[in-house]
Every structure is written in C-alpha cells, then in structure tokens.
Image (tube, rainbow, N blue to C red):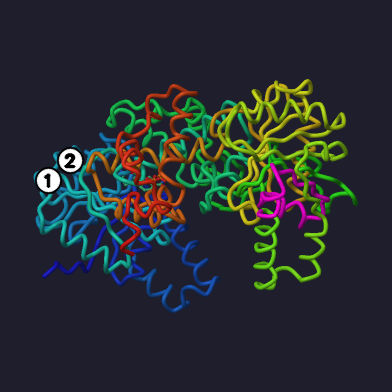
Amino acid sequence: MAREFTSVGVVGLGTMGAGIVEVFARNGLDVMAVEISEAALDRGRATLTGSTDRAVAKGKLAEADRDALLSRVNFQVGLDALHAVDLVVEAVPEHLDLKQRIFAELDRVCKPEAILATNTSSLSVTEISVATARPHQVIGIHFFNPAPVMKLVEVVRTVVTSAEVVADVEALCARLGKVDVTISDRAGFIANALLFGYLNHAVSMFESRYTTREDIDAAMKLGCGLPMGPLALMDLIGLDTAYEILDTMYRRGGRDRRHAPVPLIKQMVTAGLLGRKSGRGFYTYERPGSPVVVPDEQTPLATESAPADASPAAGTKVGVVGSGTMATGIIEVFAKAGYEVVSVTRGAEKSAKVFEAVRTSLNKGVVRGKLSEADREAALGRITWSASLDHLADVDLVVEAVVEELSVKKALFASLDEICKPGVVLATTTSSLPVIDVAMATQRPADVVGLHFFNPAPIMPLVEVVRTIRTSPETTATAGAVCAAIGKTGVVCGDRSGFIVNALLFPYLNDAVKMLEANYSTADDIDHAMKLGCGYPMGPFELLDVVGLDVALAIQRELYLELREPGFAPAPLLEHLVTAGYLGRKTGRGFRDHTRR
Ligand SMILES: NC(=O)c1ccc[n+]([C@@H]2O[C@H](COP(=O)([O-])OP(=O)(O)OC[C@H]3O[C@@H](n4cnc5c(N)ncnc54)[C@H](O)[C@@H]3O)[C@@H](O)[C@H]2O)c1
C-alpha cells in the first residue's frame, strides 16, 4: 500500500513553486507554502491567486473550488512551519550550496518519516541528499513549467533513494493527475538534457543576428508545431534559472560546449532582464509576471511586415521547375493563390503525373469544403505545362525544386540566367546546399534567394527566406512579399547549413538517439517526456520515424561538417540503423516496428 499524503510543504514560491502549490491544493492536499520573506510570500500568494482567478475566468475552475483550493494553502515565512508535513518539495533558485543548506535545515525541522524532494532541473539530487541524514528519503520531483498545465513529472531516484519512497512518490504523481517517468540522477534528466542545447543554440542565433527573435520563434512554432518558440520559452523559464541550468549541465554533463551558456544570457541576467517574471527578457511584457508581450524597439515596424492584402498583381507569372513532392506542392500553392504558373518538368509523362497529383490534392480541398469546384478549375486553369525551360522567358519569379544535387542545380541556374528576363527573382528550395553556390552559377547572384518550403507545402505555413551574402535587400523583400501573397509566414535567415529549423531541430533529435544509446531511458519515456513536459506534438523517435532516419542522418552530417561542432557528430546508433535499412515508417521499421501496429 502506498503511503497516504495529507499535508505537503513547498519551499520557494517563484515561477515553479507557486505552480506546484496550486497542483497540490487543487488535488485536495493541505499545503504549507514557505518563503524567505514577507515580500516574497506576497508575490507567491499573488501568483497563486492570479493563476486560479484566470482558471475561474476561463471556466476551468468553479469559484467554490477556487475558494476551497486557496483555503488549503497556508503561507509562512521560514522552514520551521514544515515540522508536521509528510513531504516537502523544494523550489528555490538553482544553486547547489543554497539547496544543500535548505535540505540540512529541512532534515532538522521535518518529522523523521517525511520525504524531502527537490524540483531541481540540473543539479545532482545525490549531492543535495547527502546534506541530510536521510538520503534514502530524498528524491527529485521535477515538475514542468507551468506546473498546473504540463502533465509530465520526472521522478529522479538516486542510488540510495529507497524503493518505497519511489513508489510512494509515483503514486502521489498519479493522484495529482500527472504522468511520471522515473529515471536516475543525470544532469538535465530527460527533457532538459534534450531541451537546453536547443534553447542555447537559438539564443546564439539571435546573438549573432543570424535572424530576429520573432523569426526564430515563428520558425519553430510553424515549422515544428511547438507550442512556443525558444526565446519566448527562455522568457517563461526565467533567464537566471536557464543560465544556472545550462551552467550546471555544462559542468556535470561532460563539458559539452553546446551547454556553455551563450554570453548574452549572462549579460541579460546581470542587467535584470530575467524574462516574464521581471517584465523584460528577449521580449517586453505588459508588466512583471504578465504573459502579454508589448511592442518595443526591436518589434518590426508595420511597414516591414507584409501588407494585409498581399494578393499577386493580376497576371503575375511564376515558373516552378521540378516534378517531385515539393515542386508539386509548390505549384498548387502558387496556383491557388492566384499566380499564373509555368511548370517545367523533364517531359510530358512527368507533367501528366504532376498534373494528376495537383488535381487530386485540390480535389481533397473540395471534398473537405475548403475550396469550391470553380476555384479548383480556376487554379488548374492557371497552370501551363511545359518540358522546356525556354517557357520561363517571361516569368516574374522562378522557384527551383529539382533533385538535391549541387551540380544539377548549378547547371539549371546557369540556364535560367540565360533564359529569364533581368530583375527576376530566382529562388531555390534547397534544404541542405549552400544557396550561394547556386547563386554563383549565374551572373546575377543579387537576384538569387532560397525559399525553403516545408513538406507538405500546401499545408505547412512556414517558408524560410534564405539570403546569401550577395542577395540584394530588394530580392529579400520581394521574396518576403511573395510568401505573404501565398499565405505563408516567411522568416528571413542567413545561408547556413540547416537554416533555422533544421539547425535547431536535428541536433536535438540526434541527442535523443544518443540518450537512448546510453540506455538512460526508453524511446517511449523519452517521447513521453518531450510531449508531456514540453508540449511537443511528437516525441523525437516518433518524428525520426516519420522524417526518415536516412534523411535525419544526412542533415546531421551536413550540420556537423559545416559547423565542426563535436556535439553535432551523428549518433552511432543512428548510423547503424540506417546501415541496417531501418529507415522509419517508409521501410516499416525505424526506432519502432511499424509492421506490427
Ligand atoms: N523555471 C522553470 O521553468 C523550471 C522548471 C522546472 C524546474 N525548475 C527548478 O525549480 C527551482 C526553482 O526555480 P524557479 O524558476 O521557480 O526560480 P525563481 O527564482 O522563480 O523562484 C525561487 C523562489 O525561491 C525563493 N527562495 C530563495 N531562497 C529561499 C529560502 N532560503 N527559503 C525559501 N524560499 C527561498 C525566492 O524568494 C523565489 O521566490 C530551480 O531548482 C529550477 O531549476 C525551474
């Protein structure tokens, strides 16, 4: 029989502690909420009432339930108030010496059978536990931010945590409506070990002005379906907390340079820009603690963003070269948006195939009620089919989507240079080749840009607009306006391997493979952790099986070769699976066996 907890304590009522109090009190537990000063106590109380009031306003919590919830919480200054509780969760700042001091004090104050838990994200639970005379009753209970919302809890057992304590805490998590994964004591556990390299990399992209904060966040939200972009997430976590987590993971996790905090983070912490809690971080908020972003000096001016009515001028012609999945999707997107499209393939047979594919896709839109039959016919009527590049002589824009081979693309761009009229924007959809190589195959590199669409193009809302060091501002602006005209969000970035999305996504996937390879956790638990702890639409292994392990390996190799970052070296397990022909769903087997499901 698992132990019944009736009263619990929470130490520290900041970003996490206040949310943890709410989770306990919502589930019928009496909570002793402890802070260091009256002022801090008031802030914690305000966070709790603010959050529960919002839940009432949204109809998620009845007023009577809120009142009952609040009546279960007792606020006190000082740890002495915790003498009678069955379990304590500590959520003070991420400093080992502070946590050790608090645990020594808790050991003195709390009753002998009480369980002492830490919400640390990156520190060693073992090192915290040895500050007490009861390390077998010390455990990690790692909640995710915001604690009342995120379903995951990582339960961290040290080599000395007793099995009963682990079982009691697992049962408690179930009572709180949480899904737990129980793991051993390693820096960053599952979720943060996979998350923080990505967050730090996103900050370095921002620091080096590779792209803007808005574009980084939009890219990850729209390109990967994440609930928030990395910089908005850093603001939610708190930059001081994020700094400490990165710093500890760097020191404990084998000095992986990707965890060495980007200098900008420390500068922002020193300047008091801590994120939402201080009202300013990467973004500016209405007031401290508010989730509402307000414009500041970095907010793009309305004139820089796309006009509201961005439909193409009548008769604007775009050429699309290629006959694969991407070309087919792109032809559909432009034709639907009102462009005249000239499709160029390598022959009538290919054109017929593309025509069928576009028609089938448009038909689906009709069946789903998203497109009228007349609109479908109009879109199809706007497409001309050709097997000769000469038909691109009078187009206003060319989008190339042929095979991902540099020699082929270069030859094509050299031909386009001869055929197309001057001033036309020439775009490549390459996802891994340097755009500048393609641009230099022409005599007009200023007019060449990358337009990186995502698959399936008719559905995915993001396009990365890749400008090389030779792309003119006019070309970039035109490319951005084209994205708006086809109903996509264009994010502008430099010409580096992986652009924004793949450069941030694939190292994270590769890290997940390394974690599996190290037997730290299972594919199921890692997938769970990222979905339930971070709100990802798919876990890394689910996603790898969909993307294709060969594709992931190729992208990861490119990133490694270009950036020479040791941490980007492809995971040996990924290479072995590819060699074995386990490429994911397309071959029936990848990380999972899809033939049995
Ligand atoms: N922020 C996140 O997204 C997140 C997520 C999961 C876990 N964590 C972990 O949770 C812990 C707390 O982080 P946070 O972001 O909530 O920090 P925070 O800075 O928002 O809050 C810390 C609180 O602890 C209080 N405090 C400091 N010393 C104290 C003492 N001696 N006694 C009582 N209270 C004291 C502070 O007044 C403050 O209110 C850290 O270990 C962090 O790594 C954070």
User: For the C terminus, which image quadrant?
Assistant: bottom left
- Tell me what residue is drawn at x 15 percent, y 61 percent: 167
Query: Can residue 242 be seen at all in this image of the molecule?
Result: no
Tag 2: residue type?
Thr
Q: Secondary structure at mark 1?
A: helix
Report if residue 337 lies within the magenta region. yes
Q: Is mark 1 within 8 Å of ligand 1?
A: no
Calculate the distance from the C-alpha at mark 2 to the C-alpha at mark 1: 8 Å
In what quadrant does ligand 1 lie?
top left
- Tell me what residue is drawn at x 48 percent, y 35 percent: 555
Residue 13: x percent and y percent? 38, 52
Query: Can residue 472 be seen at all in this image of the molecule?
Result: yes
Q: Would you name the residue on which mark 2 appears?
A: 126
User: For the N terminus, which image quadrant?
Assistant: bottom left
In the picture, measured across the screen, residue 367 lies left or right of residue 107, that is right
- Tell me what residue is drawn at x 74 percent, y 29 percent: 448
Q: Judge whether 375 appears above or below 432 on screen.
A: below
Residue 585: x percent and y percent? 41, 54
Report the front residue among 211 and 59. Answer: 211
Residue 513: x percent and y percent? 33, 41
Q: Secondary structure at mark 2?
A: helix
Q: Judge whether 374 appears above or below 549 on screen.
A: below
Report crowding for label 2: few under 14, some 14 to 19, many 20 or more residues within 10 A (C-alpha): many
Report crowding for label 1: few under 14, some 14 to 19, many 20 or more residues within 10 A (C-alpha): many
In the picture, measured across the screen, residue 140 lies left or right of residue 353, that is left
CB of mark 2 within 8 Å of CB of mark 1? yes
Q: Which residues are magenta?
A: 328-353
